[in-house]
């Protein structure tokens, strides 16, 4: 059977992938042909319940009509403008983001890793400008994930993880402390330290939420030592954890915050926000990007944010997330359920997570596994309790199948 108008069969297309893609990802064995709300559809029209959202991206649902319309409309006006030009979507989005999250300035980027690069660069330059060239050191958390470009990768506290293996040496100037351990963070700071950088919930690391006292302790310590507190909210931002930004939920504000993923509704955009005072650190020419603040991406982001706000999707994430976590206790072999809002992890008593993920996809439920024992779910924030019930049904089946396979192999 040919796949739509391509003239190729599914087998031809998957062979094409083997032949031409310089692969860096283990992909599913189907072609994602259509997205619609809580579902994506393969080349034969089979529906998959989406508890993954393209890695915590499609928060207002797959192919959200308001976002799609904004993209189509903007494409007929300006698709690209240089960074000498202002565009309407850029200005309206800058105002919307800053006003909504209580920040004063925004630096646009194209992805999460770049948003973190901007944050790291601004912190280092601020240190150099105000205290001298020795103030460049940044303390981040063990088990963190900040991205795959060298600055963000060096900030990532996973020296033995595949994302760093083979790519060393990392950049100097970073130390790693145990997450949720204030004393360890303090012990890693030196006279050279200019900033502490953390995720409010460690996502890729296995879904570990920060304790409020930990973030408050970091805030107080940074204030005492004239250091900056940086949050990576690439995964937690824009409703995912039950408030617009996770720091709003915690009530502990950073000096700089990075964001990406959900903000663009699927279009590649990242940003970092800060105060007017800190933003002065980047004068003209200090940092830039050909594509940052791309008008199509900004138009999509504006529509996505409006959907998140108008439909109160953060509140939905909080309510439905709490229900989902309660229902997850029905799964067998559960050691711990962790999460905030609709960023949820399940740690199993056995190393079956990758097989659970595999079985779930076979059972037409999209999830991911981040450690041999840990699966992570991050559905679109439009998820209902009925969607959760359906996911639980498919998960129980998938866990039982994975556990049976593991015991057959033992
Ligand atoms: C917390 C965090 N920071 C940074 C990144 C990198 O974002 P991107 O893949 O858009 O570069 C990710 C991606 O998963 C992330 O979860």
Image: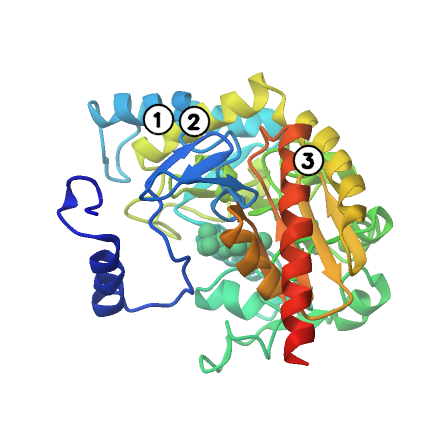
Q: At 31% across and 37% down in the image, what residue appears?
A: 294
Tag 2 and tag 3, C-beta contact below 8 Å: no
Q: Position of residue 364 (x, y in %)?
A: 51, 46
Q: At 33% across and 21% down in the image, what residue appears?
A: 69
Circle on res. 53: none
User: Looking at the image, which is closer to me, 24 or 217?
Assistant: 24
Residue underneath mark 2: 64
Q: CA distance from mark 2 to mark 3?
A: 23 Å
Tag 1 and tag 2, C-beta contact below 8 Å: yes
In the drawing, does residue 190 fall left or right of residue 78?
A: right
Residue underneath mark 3: 389
In the drawing, does residue 119 fall left or right of residue 253?
A: left
Q: Position of residue 183 (x, y in %)?
A: 86, 66
Q: Residues within 10 Å of mark 1 (few under 14, many from 20)?
A: some
Q: At 66% across and 36% down in the image, what residue appears?
A: 388
Where 259 falls versus 180 (above or below)? above
In the drawing, does residue 326 fall left or right of residue 313?
A: right
Q: Residues within 10 Å of mark 2 (few under 14, many from 20)?
A: many
Q: At 40% across and 40% down in the image, what residue appears?
A: 46
Q: Is residue 15 visible?
A: yes
User: Looking at the image, which is closer to me, 101 or 69?
Assistant: 69
Q: Position of residue 255 (x, y in %)?
A: 65, 45
Residue underneath mark 1: 68
Q: Position of residue 100 (x, y in %)?
A: 59, 25
- For mark 1, give the secondary structure: helix
Q: Residue furthest left?
A: 7
Which mark is first along the chain, 3 or 2?
2
Q: How many marks?
A: 3
Instruction: Please identify, in this view, whether the residue under mark 1 or under mark 3 is nearer the observer.
Output: 3
């Amino acid at each position: 059977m040919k796949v739509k108008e391509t003239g190729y069969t599914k087998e031809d297309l998957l062979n094409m992938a083997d032949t031409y893609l310089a692969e860096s990802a283990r992909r599913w064995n189907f072609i994602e042909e259509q997205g619609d709300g809580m579902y994506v559809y393969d080349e034969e029209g089979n529906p998959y319940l989406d508890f993954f959202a393209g890695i915590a991206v499609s928060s207002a649902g797959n192919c959200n009509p308001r976002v799609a319309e904004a993209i189509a409309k903007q494409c007929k006006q300006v698709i690209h403008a240089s960074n000498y030009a202002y565009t309407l979507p850029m200005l309206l989005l800058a105002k919307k983001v800053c006003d909504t999250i209580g920040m004063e300035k925004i630096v646009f980027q194209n992805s999460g890793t770049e948003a973190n690069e901007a944050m790291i660069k601004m912190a280092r330059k601020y240190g150099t400008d105000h205290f001298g060239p020795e103030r460049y050191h940044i303390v981040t958390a063990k088990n963190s994930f900040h991205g795959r470009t060298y600055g963000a990768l060096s900030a990532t506290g996973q020296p033995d993880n595949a994302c760093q293996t083979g790519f060393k040496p990392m950049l100097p100037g970073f130390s790693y402390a145990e997450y949720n351990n204030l004393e360890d963070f303090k012990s890693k700071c030196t006279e050279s330290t200019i900033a502490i950088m953390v995720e409010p919930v460690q996502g890729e690391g296995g879904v570990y939420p920060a304790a409020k006292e930990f973030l408050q302790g970091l805030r107080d310590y940074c204030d005492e030592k004239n250091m900056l507190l940086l949050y990576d909210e690439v995964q937690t931002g824009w409703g995912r954890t039950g408030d617009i930004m996770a720091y709003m939920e915690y009530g502990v504000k950073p000096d700089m915050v990075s964001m990406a993923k959900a903000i663009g509704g699927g279009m590649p955009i990242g940003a970092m926000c800060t105060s007017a005072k800190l933003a002065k650190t980047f004068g003209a020419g200090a940092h830039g990007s050909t594509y940052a603040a791309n008008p199509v991406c900004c138009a999509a982001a504006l529509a996505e944010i409006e959907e998140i706000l108008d439909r109160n999707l953060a509140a939905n994430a909080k309510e439905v997330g709490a229900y989902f976590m309660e229902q997850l206790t029905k799964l067998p072999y559960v050691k711990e359920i962790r999460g905030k809002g609709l960023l949820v992890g399940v740690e199993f008593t056995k190393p079956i997570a990758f097989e659970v993920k595999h079985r779930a996809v076979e059972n037409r439920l999209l999830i991911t596994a981040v450690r041999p024992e840990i699966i992570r779910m991050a559905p679109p924030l439009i998820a209902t309790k009925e969607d959760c019930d359906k996911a639980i049904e498919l998960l129980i089946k998938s866990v039982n199948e994975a556990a049976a396979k593991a015991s057959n192999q033992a």
